[in-house]
């Protein structure tokens, strides 16, 4: 997510803002910018790349002194990471500057409205429409607070907006909806931050803001209101974290923080991907209907967790589109001389967008004139840049080496691709597609419900500290979940862990079963008997041989309880979407076990976040 800093008070705003942005660098970003109010003018500078680029520019061309300012580190969503797309963005007349975190879902229609009124947009961002709309309001006589209230009532999506008006030099106004923003309360000065790390060295007195609220900062005070302009209250609290904890939002690891960000990340991955009529719209796919209809084979490529996301996707995409779908490890695909034609769609899944094995795979595919679609979390990274089309997962920066929200948002993006192909090709009726997309929209809440049971997994990890080997079983779309759960344990707890298709047990792996061996078993939803009952049989077989069965099953599934040493309950969900939920307890378990073993969860031994070598 983007980093946001605001300041008004007696200090030089540039120094406070830049230092605050530096404290937020851990969040990951690809450009940085600042806007100050000086002598009833706005002065700004913004640069692609790291904060050091902006600091170098400011050293070469210093901005004039100012005691009111805002600053931003951008994690690109709409528009590549360039100087012109960096924040802040200004209104047409340069009177209002805005910085933004989140996604303005209806920005396209607002942009069209502004352009038809003669506004010329200078960037590809959704943010810029907010700057033009706010400026229109203040130029029509509203103060910035009223302008913010009016504009926020017109926006849909998730956003934090922070703005300054050259005509109101000692005021910073901000608003939030489903996006982080916190106020720092100083003595004769006040601060804003996307988290407390932005201002913790100045004050530990903070104010938590509620949903759909506007906050107005001056030197002398802070006023909170609703989007409708009614007075409201924030919740004051004292920050007792140290800076390191503040950067992780109070969590001990970035990975644990990212596990708990998944309700938000899954919601963001779904944002803006249905039009006003409820039909799927994946504008960024940038492939014509004819091209999409001509596809006669899909090959999904990826590595590690991304590969497992592809394995889940295969079940969904083939079921919905009836297009043959293969899934391959990028490094195997690249060198096996695959059969590729102009009607093959290669889908490259990569959180970082820089994995060399996957990059080489798509280069090979394009040499064979196949179309390539990237599913990626990092805007402007190499793999999407070298692809014909892209679906961004909008998970926000994933700092922990072990992928968590990267995986669940990759699943969302693959589900959306499958449903979109089905919509374009007519392989599903509209009401069938709507049924699945409606269930998807309930997933953030279902993900939250699973995470609310985290303590159960932490206790289980404590009981399994001495485990030396752990197996994972799954069936159908649960099989890739078993593989992903095993990978999490390998890379975090440095344990032997192995995932199997449950049907494969009797073909060899059951020889591994011995008394006390822990086996996680992902049980499919009860709706598809042939899958559910066969999974129950597999659990009976290993239990009869002494395995310690840790069973993940639907909350009302009593058929398997008799064979479970440990029972982990999941909300009811359809078979193809169950991986979104079943993976969560496995993430929590691996993170906690590694923590209890004293490992570095964020930087596990021998691993890198992005493997940029073949
Ligand atoms: C997963 O926890 C690992 N970090 C690793 O398997 C990772 O998924 C793989 O290297 C692919 O990375 P990418 O998604 O950035 O391409």
Image (spheres, rainbow, N blue to C red):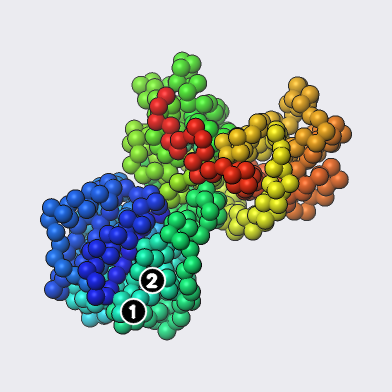
Residue 88 sits in which quadrant? bottom left
Tags 1 and 2 in contact by the CB under 8 Å rule?
A: yes
Position in image of residue 284 (x %, y %): 38, 44
Tell me if 448 is positioned left or right of 80 in this view.
right
Q: Is mark 1 within 8 Å of ligand 1?
A: no
Residue 115: x percent and y percent?
Answer: 23, 60
Residue at 77% from the left image edge and 34% from the top image edge: 517
**Which of the two residues, 265 or 375, is positioned nearer the viewer here?**
265
Location of the N terminus (image quadrant): bottom left
Horizontal and vertical percent for residue 432? 60, 48
Q: For residue 194, say whether it is visible.
A: no
Q: Is residue 366 left or right of residue 520?
A: left
User: Which image quadrant is residue 543 in?
Assistant: top right
Give the labeled residue for mark 2.
Answer: 203
> For residue 599, what is the image quadrant?
top right
Crowding around mark 2 (Cα neighbors within 10 Å: few <14, some 14 to 19, many 20+) is some
Q: Give the Cα distance between marks 1 and 2.
A: 9 Å
Choose between 516 and 397: the one closer to the eye.
516
Going 56% across and 36% down the picture, which residue do you hit? 491
Residue located 48% across and 74% down the image: 237
Circle 1 SS class: loop
Residue drawn at (48%, 63%) of the image: 241
Q: Is residue 581 visible?
A: yes
Q: Mark 1 or mark 2, which has the lower sequence index?
A: 1
Q: Does residue 528 sit above or below 69 in this rendering?
A: above
Q: Residues within 10 Å of mark 1 (few under 14, many from 20)?
A: few
* Local secondary structure at mark 2: loop
Which labelled disc corresponds to residue 187?
A: 1
Residue 422 higher or lower than 54, as above or below: above
């Amino acid at each position: 997510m983007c980093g946001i800093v605001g300041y008004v008070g007696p200090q030089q705003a540039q120094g406070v803002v830049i230092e605050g942005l530096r404290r937020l660098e851990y969040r990951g970003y690809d450009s940085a910018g600042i806007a100050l109010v000086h002598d009833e003018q706005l002065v700004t500078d913004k640069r692609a790349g790291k904060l050091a680029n902006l600091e170098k520019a400011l050293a070469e061309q210093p901005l004039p002194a100012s005691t009111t300012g805002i600053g931003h580190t951008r994690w690109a969503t709409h528009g590549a990471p360039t100087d012109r797309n960096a924040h802040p963005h200004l209104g047409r007349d340069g009177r209002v500057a805005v910085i933004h975190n989140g996604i303005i879902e209806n920005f396209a229609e607002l942009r069209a409205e502004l352009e038809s009124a003669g506004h010329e947009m200078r960037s590809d961002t959704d943010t810029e429409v907010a700057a033009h709309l706010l400026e229109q309001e203040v130029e029509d006589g509203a103060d910035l607070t009223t302008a913010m209230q009016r504009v926020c009532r017109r926006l849909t999506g998730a956003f934090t907006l922070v703005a300054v008006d050259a005509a109101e030099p000692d005021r910073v106004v901000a608003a939030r909806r489903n996006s982080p923003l916190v106020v720092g309360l100083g003595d004769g000065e006040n601060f804003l931050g996307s988290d407390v790390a932005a201002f913790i060295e100045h004050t530990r007195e903070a104010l938590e803001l509620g949903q759909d609220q506007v906050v107005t900062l001056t030197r002398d005070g802070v006023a909170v209101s609703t989007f409708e302009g009614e007075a409201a209250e924030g919740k004051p609290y004292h920050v007792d974290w140290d800076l390191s904890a503040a950067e992780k939002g109070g969590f001990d690891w970035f990975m644990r923080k990212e596990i708990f960000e998944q309700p938000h990340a899954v919601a963001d991955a779904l944002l803006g991907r249905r039009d006003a009529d409820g039909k799927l719209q994946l504008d960024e796919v940038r492939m014509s209907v004819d091209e999409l209809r001509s596809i006669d084979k899909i090959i999904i490529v990826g590595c590690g967790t991304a590969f497992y996301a592809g394995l889940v996707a295969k079940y969904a995409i083939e079921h919905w589109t009836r297009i043959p779908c293969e899934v391959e490890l990028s490094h195997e695909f690249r060198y096996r001389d695959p059969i590729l034609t102009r009607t093959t769609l290669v889908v490259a899944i990569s959180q970082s967008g820089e994995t060399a094995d996957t990059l080489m795979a798509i280069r090979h595919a394009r040499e064979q004139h196949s179309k390539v679609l990237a599913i990626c979390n990092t805007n402007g990274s190499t793999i999407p840049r070298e692809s014909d089309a892209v679906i961004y997962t909008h998970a926000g920066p994933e700092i922990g080496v072990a992928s968590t929200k990267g995986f669940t948002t990759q699943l969302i993006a693959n589900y959306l691709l499958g449903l979109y192909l089905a919509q374009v090709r007519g392989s599903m009726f509209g009401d069938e597609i709507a049924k699945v997309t409606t269930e998807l929209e309930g997933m953030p809440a279902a993900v939250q419900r699973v995470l609310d049971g985290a303590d159960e997994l932490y206790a289980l990890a404590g009981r399994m500290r001495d485990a030396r080997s752990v197996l994972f079983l799954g069936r159908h779309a649960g099989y890739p979940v078993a593989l992903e759960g095993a990978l999490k344990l390998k890379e975090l707890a440095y344990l032997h862990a192995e995932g199997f298709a449950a049907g494969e047990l009797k073909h060899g792996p059951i020889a591994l079963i011995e008394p006390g061996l822990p086996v996680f078993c992902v049980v499919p939803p009860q709706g598809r008997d042939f899958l559910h009952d066969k999974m129950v049989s597999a659990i009976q077989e290993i239990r009869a041989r002494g395995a310690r069965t840790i069973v993940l099953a639907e909350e009302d599934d009593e058929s398997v309880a008799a064979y479970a040493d440990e029972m982990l309950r999941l909300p009811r969900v359809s078979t193809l979407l169950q991986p979104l939920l079943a993976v969560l307890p496995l993430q929590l378990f691996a993170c906690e076990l590694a923590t209890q073993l004293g490992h570095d969860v964020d930087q596990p031994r021998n691993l890198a976040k992005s493997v940029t070598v073949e």
